[in-house]
Amino acid sequence: MRRCWVAMLWIGASHGAVTAGADLEQAERNYQQLCQQCHGVNRIGGAGPALLPQSLGRIKPGEIRQVIENGRPASQMAAFGALLEPAQIDALALYLQRPPSVAPNWNEADIRQSHRVLVDVATLPNQPQHRADPLNLFVVVEAGDHHVAVVDGDRFEVLARFASHFAVHGGPKFSPDGRFVYLASRDGWISLYDLHNLKLIAEVRAGLNTRNLAVSKDGRWVLVGNSLPGNLAVLDARDLSLVKTIATLGSDGQASRVSAVYTAAPRNSFIVALKDVNEVWELSTGPNPDFVPRRIEVQDHLDDFSFSPDYRQLLATSRKAQGGQVIDLDSGQVVTDISLPGMPHLGSGTYWQRDGRWVFATPNISKGLVSVIDIGTWQVIRQIPTLGPGFFLRSHANSRYAWTDVFFAPGNDAIHLIDKQTLEIAHTLRPMPGKTAAHVEFTHDGRYLLLSIWDTDGALIVYDSNTLKEVKRLPMNKPSGKYNVGNKIEFAEGTSH
Ligand code: DHE
């Protein structure tokens, strides 16, 4: 990506310095002159990320202003503080948070035009071209400088590192044999990477604002859930070419954004949660799928959900039900409501066996509690107090503990280890005091685990999962999620699906 110097020189030459007292119209002109070249006509993104309200919603207004003024280190985003008056920067930051004058659109032709195949897979060896165990590789998202690292899960060494699109979010998903990984960026870019050959294979922009993606059980299809435009994009998993888009309209015709898409492998289907209509969709991925949704009516819009271990039921957040609702996927009926007033982050929850019964535990985003639910009775059996609201919870069938963070609390350098049988906090670690610690993934055998220190000057810390001793520390730039190939393709207990 080129820096925005051309635009900077142009405006410098024509105006000397940009006039003070800029209003939103002036901000629009400044956008066209300074930003459009990288961030695209109508702000839909280009070499730089999209600057739409949907894309910027997670960023604090002060941070938007700060990036315009000072640029982004280790990126192509230039600093405009010397060129724009403070009031003009304020106006530009405000302008970017408002919808553009022309509603952004991204249709099938745009998707097809964005598609590029970088390497023909048929020309590549189909055996791993590295010495690591292909089922014990980790794919690690480094959010600080938008890169992805591939880590050998036995030697804990970085095998490869490549630039991703802006803001990869959600779990990357794998082909059933673990050779290929599919990544989604918030800007709608989907990337296909070959873990045998450590090469990027193909890319496509499937939407302007994407929630996440899922790969079908047979590895033939990728389903992308978009919130802008509100639709689903079905891609051919071999090269990411577009098969079709499906507008996410409720049965009454109301348009909806997608909350999330998942694969329900035992059902051979995709499950789609919708954000603006009270429906969950199931799309069969059996032989010759037509991708026509089966609509399941629910009581509330779904933001976030988790499957029961047999994939027959969904445990979904529901504000109306004051927490959660359980939906049976076969009958389409709501089985029960569960009172979970702490705003559970169900997609990050996990389940395990306790006294011969399945329990499901979830962190809560607004309360310092981990809620534990008996899946047989759907009763909340324990609310475990923590140092603050958390985001992720992880374990492994061979681990005695479930690891959770306190992401939203001032003391978010702490990590709690919950004993899966006593349901008490057994240990609290502070791996790097003062720095956020969050998100764990275990090695395939569960002997070790990797924990993120979520900081530009951060690290991936490897722990022995039994002795809790630190084994290694790999410096990394804000590592967020990390994903073990073997655990993922086996939909293993303790990890996200
Ligand atoms: Fe995530 C997973 C939704 C904000 C980091 N997040 C997911 C998934 C969903 C989701 C639906 C599951 C996707 C999958 O596995 O395919 N996330 C949301 C939100 O709705 C929310 C609260 C607001 C939003 O703007 O989207 C949100 N998420 C964040 C963040 O602010 C985080 C901390 C930093 C970031 O990267 O944006 C964040 N989300 C993650 C990570 C995962 C994730 C690391 C993967 C978890 C896993 O282990 O599978």
Image (cartoon, rainbow, N blue to C red):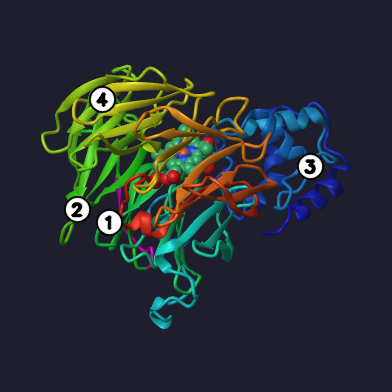
Secondary structure state at the residue bearing disc 4: strand
Give whichever of 397, 311 is nearer the camera.
Answer: 397
Distance between mark 1 and mark 2 Cα atoms: 7 Å
- Residue at 49% across / 75% down in the picture? 131
Give whichever of 79, 383 is nearer the camera.
Answer: 383
Density class for disc 2 (Cα within 10 Å; few <14, some 14-19, many ≥20) is some
- The kind of residue on which mark 3 rests is Phe
Residue topped by disc 3: 80
Magenta residues?
239-246
- The kind of residue on which mark 2 rests is Asn
Tell me the tag on residue 268: 2
Q: Mark 3 and 1 residues: CB-CB less than 8 Å, in contact?
A: no
Distance between mark 2 and mark 4 Cα atoms: 23 Å
Q: Earlier in the sequence, mark 3 or mark 1?
A: 3
* Apparent side of residue 53 relative to residue 121 in the rendered image (left or right): right
For residue 456, above or below residue 254: below
- Residue at 30% across / 39% down in the picture? 352
Q: Earlier in the sequence, mark 3 or mark 2?
A: 3
Furthest residue toward right? 16
